[in-house]
Image (cartoon, helix red, strand yellow):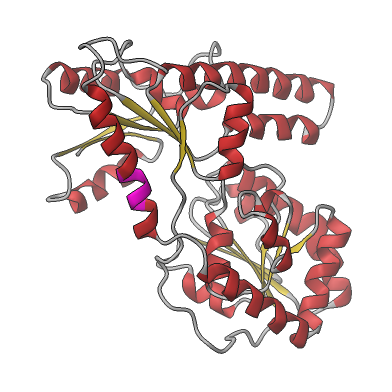
Amino acid sequence: MHLCVVSKTYEEDLAAADRLDGLCASVAVFRAITGGNDVPPQVRRHRCPEASEHLRSLLDDGLVDLVHVEGFYLLGHLPEPSPVPVLLVEQNIEYTLWEQRVTLAEGATNQRRAFLDFRETRAYELDAWQRVTLCAAVTDDDRRTMLQLAPQLNVRVVPDGVDHLGSSPLAPVAAQPELVFIANFAYQPNVDAAFWFCREILPRVRERVPDVRALLVGNGPPKKVQALACERVCVTGRVRSVAPYLDRAAVVVSPLRVGGGIKVKVLEALCRGKAIVSTGVGIQGLGSGASDCIAVADDAATFAQSCSSLLRDPAARRKLEHRARTFGAALPTWDEAAESLAACYRELVGARQAFPLGSVGGR
């Protein structure tokens, strides 16, 4: 595997590249360049002529049997048409996130901007799907969304795995009334969730549970998220492992208002056997059974009530924890996820024989 990274955290990723020695044939890390207003935001944030030239060189040298592109916004770095089959994996259906942002935008100007970004992203994303040999989504829900927009697509499901944190404690660790939100705070939907939680939900919880604490755990918190820290709110930044924070949580929260795909933070909490309160966005992709083991609330008052009730009722919390652990045990492992991806690779290597050189495109 030749790994090509277009990075928004260039120094950090470049420093970590040596860890892949012996696993990859080559690793190339390039700095993402932001610019231009003629493309969707995600495409705008991942421009890099050097990466495009590097990929063209690999393809010209005949070193590549197939290309795996992680996210439609990176597809533009490939020459068109591609001389080899292309797999496009979508962790989110990105245009649906912009559709959600339209409803949350405040003021006519912001709503119009969000709508234009939604419309532009949908057009670019659909075009990307139609240009590649094979598409993959992380959930059945996302696969259905893709096929509704483009019924002719060839789409597989490559799920996220859930067994990477190891075994969870059999007995609850939580002793304090702590609410834990684990997220990558370099990602805007998680920033929105942190603000909504701290400003609209947590004050309501404190009215019922005065000694409650909230922990915002995860890398990349911008200054405005760091500013949420106070006597009752801890912002940790990057941590070595999220497992201890999950285990100490009385309740894990996922207050997302924008999102797609599946939420690894929720998968991890399920497998650690935690009581979870989430919005409907937070449980996307988990199927109808998720609502039996996760308390779902989409407005601040109901979300706060669910958190408060679980904090004050250990028996109800233990019941939800048991259901979460049972549900989590049935989720895909990373070995199963890897096999799904390997099956896509095998299919594409076979498909290469069906295309004359330089003619691979959508089908």
- Residue 254 visible in the snapshot: no
**Range drawn in magenta:** 338-342
Screen quadrant of the N terminus: top left
Residue 126 position, x and y percent, is 54, 20
> Where does the image place residue 119, in percent across and percent down from the top left?
66, 18
What residue sits 38% from the left and 41% below the top?
9
- Which residue shows up at 81% across the image and 52% down it? 298
The residue lying at 40 percent from left, 28 percent from top is 134
Vertical placement of residue 155 versus 339, above or below? above
User: Which residue is located at x 69 percent, y 84 percent?
Assistant: 318
Q: Is residue 264 magenta?
A: no
Please name whichever residue, 122 or 362, is drawn nearer the observer in this view of the structure.
362
Residue 92, quarter of picture: top right
Q: Quadrant of the C terminus?
A: top left
User: Residue 168's x, y, as percent?
Assistant: 48, 79
Residue 293: name its quadrant: bottom right
Q: Quadrant of residue 75?
A: top left
